[in-house]
């Protein structure tokens, strides 16, 4: 624990935002910082949750402990909705209370003796959970010893040079990436899977933003041949259905994925889930099932489309101002380049002068220095107002 | 992972129950095995959850990520309901998705370098999470090396001889105990706290059954002077409000609890919670708040009283049959002695001959050998029928 740097990124941003507000109590702060959904959850989904909640007060509708792995119907719906034809079935799906929680459970599974590789920049929970599990050395020069930082930047099209990785047991790979918004192509993911096959690494593929993909980038790692033998996939309803507060996600551990001694990874993960977790809330699971009904899918898509329009507004704003802007097309995040500047300085400038919260790129790793991430999760009027303020600040 | 024995206890019981049912498809099996609540959740609580669920589809009622530590109102209600006058305030409370989940997060906090002590017998998650975290040696003679098993049996009134423990960094102590149903007295807990002060150990006090206490045993470790400097307390709405499927609990880490270098344990636990968890479901939290309203408290108490009547029925049944029966008074568990017999054999006998699922005592540690735990969580007619079958089987 002592090795961890300062606070976890998002609580740290919340702290700075609160400090700004205490100095400027009248500031109309708009948050495009933490990627937190803002739009109401479609009725068809909340009705199902309300109905399940009420049913819990009836003899017929009451249920206690569910399967730690999740309700059969939901596991089955996830498999058939997102993995049809990809060789993944219901028994490969573990329902969770969110991707972040399962990242930690996976780290508990891997233990302290493994070396991880992460995209640089990437979602900080991979690195922080690794440090907490004792997998790393000390922090120095913006890096922890014994973590492989796979640089992703405009020069390499945000896909790392895999030949530079040495000996990673576990590769965390998020596509579309948080924070860069970049989605890996089929060719790139094929390279990644082949690399893992060759080296015996396990890929932990985070597809929490897959439904934001607009082009023909794969939405699941299992679209790549052979991925079932090398990859775990984690995903979530958070950014699809606005479930950031409801808490529901899933992890796919295919039965074909084996440790080097031939033991199925899924068997060990199942044991972790049964010992360290008691299943996601039954009410949230009822919501998840409604998400995957035909009406639910349509409703989720329309929420996603709304955020994608926001993304376009933000991209247009920064592009017009002359910035180099990345991401956005396949993700609800816009990655704006401020070459030569410190991310935290830019963060502070935007907060203090425009009352807009962004996320400093360096919070996602050394490769994020000089960028800020602007999230498209916001009410339309806030996104428009933030864009006006940006145009004012950087005109 | 390889050191772990067979399955986690309760999934293993579920497996044996399923095997029995597949051999005897018409068997009317009654489960008094896993301590799973069976009675509907009172309306006042489910209505609050349904209302919160529906509100999530409105602009005003929507909320995304909440504080990882839980909603302020709920933390405050837990502090004032269960810890009034005990020096615990809202900021010491971490809301969780259940006690079992927080046991694992605490183990992640402690890391692989600590030695734990557990009551023997005790709830298996303490030991299994310790093994998974790499704190133990190999399993031999029903024990893991490097775990201290503190024997609790009829001879010592189910309170361990603390002078026999050597060097435990963390003492897991559950009172009322699962599975023995025994609650430690004020004098016993005072001994425990003084012992921890002397040795510098941290007590993890599991009070998940405290509301079942009928006598004057303490309901919280913080009723004992000095406990705030040595103890963490974990608890849950599961057995109070029937929230086994809804998932809501809490952990108290007092700010007075320090590591030997003076660093507050709460600061590190907060970091774990922020990195490895994203808060309990907002809908479940609305339910928790309703539980702690005056009507909610009354409704929970009446559910608890119902299970306590069940407990009495089970105790009377086994007592009449001439068994030595323990627990029951302060807990929803009856601990029945079958001297000289194997617990799993008794479990199998009761399952095969009476179609009743119990829990074999040895599943809770070597000190549970020769006992079975009978849970009082069941519909009244099932408890009565199970009692009739027991009377038949052991007449």
Image (cartoon, coloured by chain):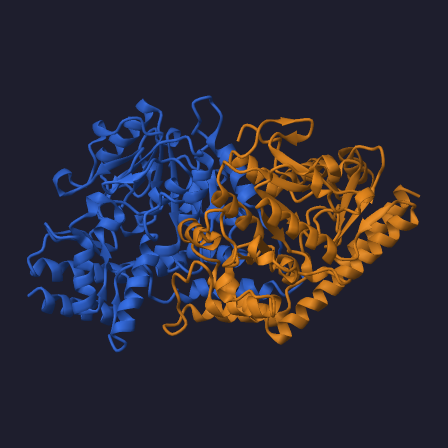
Chain colours: A orange, B blue
For this orientation, the residue located farthest to the bottom is B26
Q: Position of residue B222 (x, y in %)?
A: 35, 36
Relative side of B16 to A43, left or right: left
Q: Is residue B348 above or below residue B188?
A: below
Which residue is rendered at x = 84% and y = 51% of the image?
A387
* Number of disc labels: 0
Q: Which picture quadrant has residue A136?
A: top right
For this orientation, the residue located farthest to the front is A198
Which residue is rendered at x = 80% and y = 61% of the image?
A309
Could you say which is closer to the camera, residue B151 or residue B183? B151
Relative side of A113 to B193, left or right: right
Which residue is rendered at x = 50% and y = 71% of the image?
A51
Relative side of B26 to B90, left or right: left
Q: Which picture quadrant has residue B348?
A: bottom left
Could you say which is closer to the camera, residue A282 or residue B224? A282
Q: Is residue A386 above or below residue A343?
A: below
Please indicate, yes or no, whether residue B237 appears anywhere in the rendered image. Answer: yes
Relative side of A20 to B94, left or right: right
Q: Position of residue B170 (x, y in %)?
A: 36, 33
């Amino acid at each position: 624990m002592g090795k961890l740097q300062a606070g976890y990124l998002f609580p740290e941003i919340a702290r700075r935002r609160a400090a700004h507000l205490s100095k400027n109590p009248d500031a109309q702060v708009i948050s495009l910082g933490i990627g937190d959904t803002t739009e109401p959850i479609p009725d068809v989904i909340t009705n199902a949750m309300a109905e399940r909640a009420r049913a819990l007060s009836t003899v017929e509708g009451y249920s206690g402990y569910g399967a730690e792995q999740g309700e059969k119907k939901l596991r089955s719906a996830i498999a058939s909705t997102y993995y049809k034809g990809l060789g993944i079935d219901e028994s490969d799906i573990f329902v969770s209370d969110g991707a972040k929680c399962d990242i930690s459970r996976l780290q508990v599974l891997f233990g302290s003796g493994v070396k991880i590789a992460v995209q640089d920049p990437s979602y900080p929970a991979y690195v922080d959970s690794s440090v907490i599990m004792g997998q790393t050395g000390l922090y120095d020069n913006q890096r922890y010893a014994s973590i492989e930082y796979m640089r992703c930047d405009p020069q390499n099209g945000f896909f790392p040079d895999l030949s530079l990785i040495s000996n990673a047991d576990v590769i965390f790979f998020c596509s579309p990436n948080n924070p860069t918004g970049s989605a890996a192509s089929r060719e790139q993911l094929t390279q990644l899977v082949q690399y893992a096959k060759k080296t015996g690494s396990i890929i932990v593929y985070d597809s929490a933003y897959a439904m934001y993909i607009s082009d023909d980038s794969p939405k699941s790692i299992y679209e790549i041949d052979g991925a079932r033998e090398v990859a775990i996939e984690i995903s979530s309803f958070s950014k699809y259905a606005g479930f950031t507060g409801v808490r529901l996600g899933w992890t796919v551990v295919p039965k074909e994925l084996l440790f080097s001694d031939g033991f199925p990874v899924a068997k060990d993960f199942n044991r972790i889930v049964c010992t360290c977790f008691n299943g996601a809330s039954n009410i949230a699971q009822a919501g998840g099932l409604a998400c995957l009904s035909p009406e639910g899918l349509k409703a989720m898509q329309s929420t996603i489309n709304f955020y994608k329009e926001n993304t376009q507004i933000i991209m247009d704003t920064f592009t017009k101002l002359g910035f180099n802007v990345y991401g956005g097309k396949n993700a609800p995040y816009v990655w704006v380049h401020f070459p030569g500047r410190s991310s935290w300085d830019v963060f502070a400038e935007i907060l203090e002068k425009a009352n807009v919260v962004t996320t400093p790129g360096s919070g996602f790793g050394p490769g994020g220095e000089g960028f800020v991430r602007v999230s498209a999760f916001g009410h339309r009027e806030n996104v428009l107002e933030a864009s006006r303020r940006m145009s004012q600040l950087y005109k």
